[in-house]
Structures are given as structure tokens and as C-alpha cells.
Image (cartoon, grey):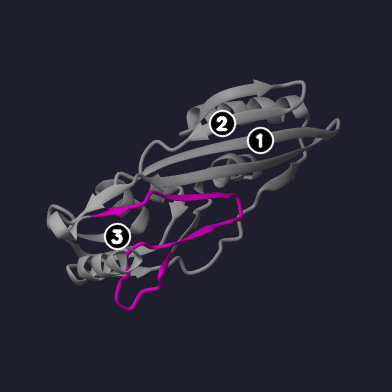
Amino acid sequence: MKIISIIMMALLSSCAVHKYTPPNHNLDITDNIEINLDFETVWEGTIERATASFFDIDNFEKDSGLLTLSFGTGSASEFVDCGQWDGRQWNGSNHTFTGPYATYLETFLGGNFTGRMKVFIKSVSDNKTTITLNAHYVLETPSRIEGSGIYETRVPAMNWAFETGGSATRKSFFSAPNSPSTRTCRPTGKAEKAILGALKG
């Protein structure tokens, strides 16, 4: 059975001309800052910034300084860098695509992205407050059928889950010429900058 699966993958890969380029490097994403303002001002400013941006506020506990946000509206490639995809592939409809691999996953493979962020705001003194955050990213594709008839094979679901400053690497079901056998995703830093960048600025 294993030999048959290998043959099926080879046959399906031979019907594709594509190239995958992984992200260049890990970004140095800031996840905490100290502000020379009192807790109340920073808390209200963070709430205001979140509601005016692409975030949804899921929960907030002012006494503990915890704010829980969700995000993901728009293209996944705004928030996660999964490298670049360039090529043509047959999977029931002949299509070409050149651009972010995350967008390719969403557009052609049913990819779904979700983002969650926890923001911790703590008073250090009357005029000094720290903000620490951690975002959790999930990009996943469902299982699917590639090919037809004797060439039909089921491609398993894939899932990339990682946090601020981290990344996730998964082995690809199909090989791509002149490309690594894995696919890597990491944050772009947009979500973190949307909160900390505005307050720090």
C-alpha cells in the first residue's frame, strides 16, 4: 500500500510545474514595551487602538490587566509569511498562481487562518506601565482528493500553529522541483505592531 501511495504521489507531482520558496528569515518582533504613562491611560489607549484596527475584543479583565483579541479578517498573508509559490498545478482545474504561499493555500486548497492575541498590561509605578503580548497563529488546510480514477489519492490535512517570534514547518505531501520538501510559516509582525507600534510611537 505504501508503494502505491508513493507511485500516486510521483504521478501527481509529474502533472505539476511549480516552485516553493520558504521565508527568508525570522523577523525580530517586539513583544513587550515600557511606557512612561499611568495604567489607566495605557489601558484605555490599548482598547481604543484595538477597536479602531482589525481586532475583535473577545474578553477583557481590567483588574488583572488582560485583554484577549482575535484577528484574521483579510488575507492570511497579511499576518503570516509562508514563503512564495510560483507555478501551475492540476487538481481538477488547471490554474496558475504566483504570490504568497499562504494566499495560495486559501485560494486553491481551502486554507483557513485564525489569530488570537493576549495582551497583558501591568502598572510598574504611577507613571510607568509595561505591555506584553503573545499572539497565536493557526493556518490549516482540510484533507482533499487529488487526481481521479486509479490516480486518485487523498491528501491529508495540514496545520501550522505557532506564536509570536516562532514558526512552524510541515513536510509537504507533494514534492516540487528545486524546492525544499517542507513548508514553513511564521508571523509577519503586523498584529504585534498594530498594538505596540502605535503605543510606542
Residue 128: x and y in percent read: 81, 37
Tell me which label, 3 or 1, sits earlier in the chain: 3
Instruction: Tell me the SS state at disc 2.
Output: strand
Q: Position of residue 8 (x, y in %)?
A: 24, 65
Q: Residues within 10 Å of mark 1 (few under 14, many from 20)?
A: many
The image shows a total of numbered marks equal to 3
Q: Disc 3 to disc 1, how far (Cα)?
A: 32 Å
**Above or below for 134 versus 7:** above
Q: Give how far across and how far down residue 17 sits, in percent.
A: 21, 70
| 85 is within the stretch colored magenta | no
Q: Are marks 1 and 2 in contact (CB under 8 Å)?
A: yes
Secondary structure of residue under mark 3? strand
| Rendered image: mark on residue 8 | none
Kind of residue at disc 2: Leu
Q: Nearer the viewer, residue 22 or 132?
A: 22
Query: In what element is the residue under mark 1?
Result: strand
Q: Which residue is mark 1?
A: 119
Determine crowd level at label 2: few under 14, some 14-19, many 20+ residues with C-alpha closer than 10 A. Answer: many
> Would you say 94 lies left or right of 62 here?
left
The image shows residue 104, relative to residue 22, as above or below, that is: above
Q: Quadrant of the N terminus?
A: bottom left
Tell me the tag on residue 69.
Answer: 2
> Can residue 137 be seen from the camera position used here?
yes
> Is residue 158 a member of the stretch shown in magenta?
yes
Per the image, the residue denoted by label 3 is 99
Residue 135 picture location, percent across and down: 59, 43
Quadrant location, the C terminus: top right
Residue interval drawn in magenta: 153-182
What residue appears at the point 14 percent right and 54 percent down from the top-left corner? Answer: 148
Amino acid type indicated by mark 3: Gly
The span from disc 1 to disc 2 (Cα, nearest Å) is 8 Å
Q: Choose between 152 and 172: the one closer to the eye.
A: 152
